[in-house]
Amino acid sequence: MISVVGLAVVLGNILIRMKYGGLVYVLSGQSVWLVFLVTIPFIVSVFVESALLKKFQILMFATMGSLNIIQAYQEFYGPGLLLAAWLVMRHYGYLDKHTKTKNVAILLLVTILSQLSAFLQNRAEAYSNDGLYAGFTTLMYTLFLVTLLVILWRDMVRQQELLKRENVSLQMNYRKLAEQLAELEEAKKPYDLKAAKISPAEARVIEALTLYKAGNKEIAERLNLAESTVKLHIYNICNKIGVDNRFAIIDLCKYNFSEG
Amino acid sequence: MTKEQWDTVSSRVRVLLNYSVAQTNWLQGSRMARLIAAVPFLAGCGKAQETSFCHLLIYLASLDEAAKELFSHKPEDDGELYTRLAPILTFSGGNGEILQCCRDLITLCMVSNYRKDAEADQKVGKYNPLNAGLWDANALIGTLTESIEKRITPEIANFYTSEDALRGFWQD
């Protein structure tokens, strides 16, 4: 995207310059070549993935921004290009660590360059007393702009982070639910009583067990059996299924007798 | 306490005590049994299921002829209102306000039960702190009711209220 915009700007600039000043005017146009120079690494990065290229992109913006500030401290080209360098750094994750230090360093760079530029230019024009004042005024405007941009940027980033967190939380919930659903689907399979060689009488005891989750006396009363018979059935069922208590039988066979 | 939690706890107790159909039917309808089993879950106590199981088991055992005498009120229980019920009123962690409310509800039922049975106890010579003149039933009921009304929540009221407790039916 940056490559396309960069090339469009270069082309537009060339066409306008050709119309108003001819080829010489085009060739002498500093801004045309600067934008073109910045665009080149972005064009290359479409085809090549390289950390060096990323650093080169940042360096291009930073160098041009610095030179622009030294050349004309009153203009916003310089700070704008440094801001672009900052955005590219952030985009590539170079500001993830030591963020504050790096931000302060960039601001310090703008400050020093603006002050130096203002001082040198005003001294050259024999207004040496106004040099620092003019530089300071420019710096204040720059700081105001940067602060405004940072506030807007921070709000955007916060919103993005909130959305990211929500997204992560939703994904986790979805995964958990999917797992639970899979577990339920798995667990809903009826136990193969035939394979375990469970007799019809034992199956009736299992059915009563899963339905009433009861003791021997209650099962015996409900099935009209002697308590000792129920006790024996449960003992045999445990051995055949390979468990050691009635609640394990209930867990294994709870979907054998449910409706549907 | 959810239906699943009650089913888990009560079914294990029923198996352990080898309940008959009639006993199971009684247990399913017992509000006091449900309250006792529910307290650890309502208050969010540690090891809620285990505590619920133990307390329900003690409560049901104390109703059985074999253990009734062990849990009956004795003169050494007179000193402190909650002493007799300590085996079912001991918890690990949990919300203090909810625990206090449930303690008071269970204790209110006990005191109301003493008041209801005072005459019959006197006839058969069974020890009753009200007949011994050591406890003032009306004062205790007033204090407990006031304490319950201050703390009761809709979740607790779903299981048991001070009106239920005032009827004094310990096995209800």
Image (cartoon, coloured by chain):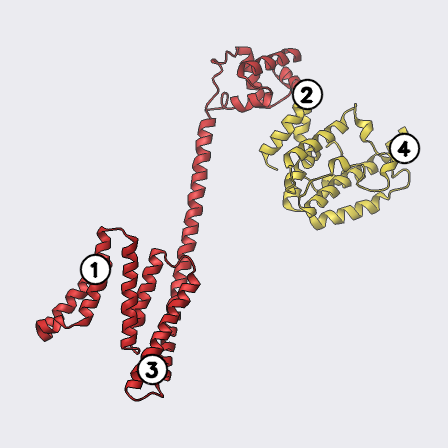
Q: Which residue is disc 1 drawn over?
A: A40
Instruction: Give the CA separation, mark 2 to mark 1.
Output: 86 Å
Instruction: Give the CA separation, mark 3 to mark 4.
Output: 109 Å
Where is residue B154? Give x, y as percent. Answer: 63, 45
Does residue A70 sit above or below A158 in this rendering? below
Instruction: Give the CA separation, mark 4 to mark 2.
Output: 34 Å
Q: Amino acid at mark 3?
A: Phe
State the residue at coordinates (19%, 64%): A36
Tell me the quarter of the picture where residue B125 sits. Answer: top right
Q: Which mark is residue B18?
A: 2
Instruction: Give the CA separation, mark 1 to mark 4.
Output: 105 Å
**Residue A161 in view:** yes
Q: Which residue is disc 3 drawn over?
A: A119
Q: Nearer the viewer, mark 3 or mark 1?
A: 3
Instruction: Give the CA separation, mark 3 to mark 1.
Output: 34 Å
Chain of the residue displaying label 4: B
What is the secondary structure assignment of the residue under circle 1?
A: helix
Whether label 2 touches label 1, CB < 8 Å: no
Chain of the residue displaying label 3: A
State the residue at coordinates (86%, 44%): B136
State the residue at coordinates (55%, 15%): A204
Where is residue B71? Give x, y as percent. Answer: 80, 31
Chain with colour yellow in the figure: B
Q: Amino acid at mark 4?
A: Gln
Q: Is residue A201 or residue B55 the one in the foreground?
A: B55
What is the secondary structure assignment of the residue under circle 4?
A: helix
Q: Is residue A66 or residue A232 the one in the foreground?
A: A66
Chain of the residue displaying label 2: B
Whether label 3 touches label 4, CB < 8 Å: no
Chain with colour red in the figure: A
Tell me the quarter of the picture where residue B117 sits. Answer: top right
Mark 2 burial class by Cα count in 10 Å: few <14, some 14-19, many 20+: some
